[in-house]
Image (cartoon, rainbow, N blue to C red):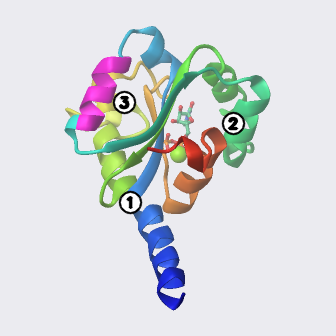
Amino acid sequence: MKRRIFAHHLNNFTMATNRTFTMLKPDATTAGNTGKIIDRIIQAGFTIKAMKWTQLSQAQAESFYEVHSERPFYGELVEYMTSGPIVAAILEKDDAVASFRELIGSTNPAEAAPGTIRADFAKSIAANAVHGSDSDENAAIEGRFYFSEREEA
Ligand code: UDP
Ligand code: MG
């Protein structure tokens, strides 16, 4: 019994540090870049734990981006994120959050390092192809926004 409890806690810890959450944004899905971006993610060593093609409602987008509600671009961001399909996914890799942020590059594609997903696919600072969680805590919250535990591979 003691061992079981220990294993449970260890598993939760491992899950948090090895996972991140992404969305391929409407500019990426509508431009036909979904497959190319997913391939980059897989080639970079991420394992897909869950994935779905869907579209955000106004209320869902407002809720997902609640943390940015005081920022000047919030209204435009919500409008943009509801403008077309998105692909939501939970990804796994060692040091997933930091590793994925490195793969996607800076928020502004003009500042994104060459070879990053945003440098190669983003259209603008708003329409920047992909979302990547900024912490283990937010990765877990954002993943649960779209997926139940039963939906994870
Ligand atoms: N964004 C925007 N204008 C800005 C900054 C951000 O439209 O000046 C959008 C952009 O789509 C970005 C999202 O808001 O990806 C969230 O902003 P954040 O600062 O969290 O950037 P990220 O973590 O996505 O790099
Ligand atoms: Mg962010």
Mark 2 and mark 1 lie on one chain; the one further toward the N terminus is 1
| Viewer-nearest residue: 19 or 118 | 19
Is residue 59 found left or right of 25 in the rendered image? right
Q: Quadrant of residue 36?
A: top left
Residue that appears at 22% across and 41% down = 44
Is residue 81 found left or right of 46 in the rendered image? right
Residue 109 - label: 3
Query: Hey, what amino acid is under mark 3?
Result: Pro
Q: Is residue 98 above or below residue 122?
A: below
Closer to the eye: label 3 or 1: 1
Q: Image quadrant for the N terminus?
A: bottom right
Measured Cα–Cα span from mark 2 to mark 3? 19 Å
Span shown in magenta:
34-42
Find out if the beta carbon at label 3 lies less than 8 Å from the nearest ligand 1 atom. no
Query: Hey, what amino acid is under mark 2?
Result: Pro
Number of other residues with Cα within 10 Å of mark 2, as a class: few under 14, some 14 to 19, many 20 or more: few
Numbered marks: total: 3
- Magenta segment's dominant SS is helix
Mark 3 and mark 1 lie on one chain; the one further toward the N terminus is 1
Is residue 78 found left or right of 36 in the rendered image? right
Q: Looking at the picture, how far across and down is residue 37, in whole percent?
A: 32, 26
Residue that appears at 60% across and 41% down = 147
Residue 119 - label: none
Q: Is residue 54 visible?
A: yes
**Residue furthest front as drawn:** 1
Question: Circle 2 is placed at which residue position?
Answer: 72
Residue 18 - label: 1
Query: Hey, what amino acid is under mark 1?
Result: Asn
Q: Looking at the picture, how far across and down is residue 110, in whole percent?
A: 34, 29
Q: Image quadrant for the C terminus?
A: top left
